[in-house]
């Protein structure tokens, strides 16, 4: 497959960084709403949950998929490859893992909390399913945000060297 030239790599890198920034920033914003918002009424609770869901649906999901897509293009169209470097392998594992975890757990928890808050309003404060989803989302959502920040630093420092090279 033909490799990208210098200008193409710069454009691809710019888009990759943009989508990564959007994903990390949105994850941090969702965590900020989860931990800092203190809704006093059912309507306020629903507003917070609806805001989190909007961030998830319209920023997290597209940014995560575009980050994955531009990463795939980097691996295919440059000399980086998929698993040539240990740090790159770790980034792939974190990226795919966080997307899958978000798809099958975090997203459904957010959707469930939003639905419960919409239907029950102030009753959601005492709903065991809502409270469970909120607790799980708080723990694992913050863990996911930290993992995303970690991938940024892995990209900057590129630790662990090339695969197959002895030290």
Image (cartoon, rainbow, N blue to C red):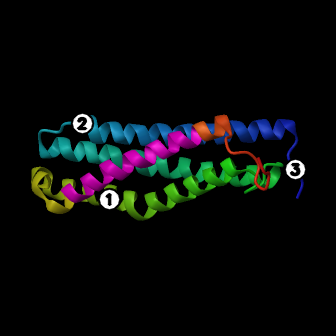
Q: Which mark is residue 135?
A: none
Give the Cα separation between the discs numbered 1 and 3: 41 Å
Q: Residues within 10 Å of mark 2 (few under 14, many from 20)?
A: few
Which residue is labeled 3 in the image? 3
**How far is the residue under mark 2 from the one under mark 1?**
18 Å
Say if the magenta span includes residue 129. Answer: no
- Residue bearing the label numbered 1: 109
Of all residues, the one furthest to the bottom in this rendering is 104
| Residue found at x 87% / y 50% | 3
Where 146 sits versus 108, above or below? above
Q: Crowdedness of circle 3 by 10 Å Cα count: few (<14), some, many (20+)?
A: some
- Horizontal and vertical percent for residue 44? 18, 41
Residues at discs 3 and 2 in contact (Cβ within 8 Å)? no
Q: Residue 156: x percent and y percent?
A: 65, 34
Tell me the CA gap for discs 3 and 2: 47 Å
Does the magenta portion include 144? Answer: yes
State which quarter of the image contains the N terminus: bottom right
Q: Earlier in the sequence, mark 2 or mark 1?
A: 2
Position of residue 142 measured from the top left corner of the image (x, y, whole percent): 38, 45
Q: Which residues are magenta?
A: 131-152
Residue 37 numbered tag: 2
* Residue situated in front as seen by the camera: 155 or 77: 155
Q: Looking at the image, is mark 3 or mark 2 earlier in the sequence? A: 3
Identify the main secondary structure in magenta. Answer: helix
Element at badge 2?
loop
Residue found 88% across the figure and 41% down from its top: 5
């Amino acid at each position: 497959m033909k490799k990208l030239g210098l200008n193409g790599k710069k454009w691809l890198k710019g888009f990759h960084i943009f989508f990564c920034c959007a994903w990390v920033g949105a994850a941090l914003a969702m965590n900020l709403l989860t931990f800092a918002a203190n809704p006093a009424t059912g309507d306020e609770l629903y507003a917070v949950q609806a805001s989190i869901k909007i961030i998830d649906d319209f920023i997290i999901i597209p940014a995560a998929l575009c980050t994955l897509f531009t990463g795939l293009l980097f691996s295919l169209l440059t000399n980086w490859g998929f698993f040539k470097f240990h740090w790159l392998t770790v980034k792939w594992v974190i990226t795919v893992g966080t997307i899958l975890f978000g798809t099958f757990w975090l997203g459904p928890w957010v959707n469930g909390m939003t639905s419960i808050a919409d239907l029950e309003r102030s009753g959601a404060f005492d709903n065991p399913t809502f409270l469970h989803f909120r607790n799980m989302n708080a723990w694992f959502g913050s863990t996911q945000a930290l993992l995303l920040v970690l991938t940024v630093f892995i990209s900057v420092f590129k630790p662990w060297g090339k695969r197959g090279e002895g030290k």
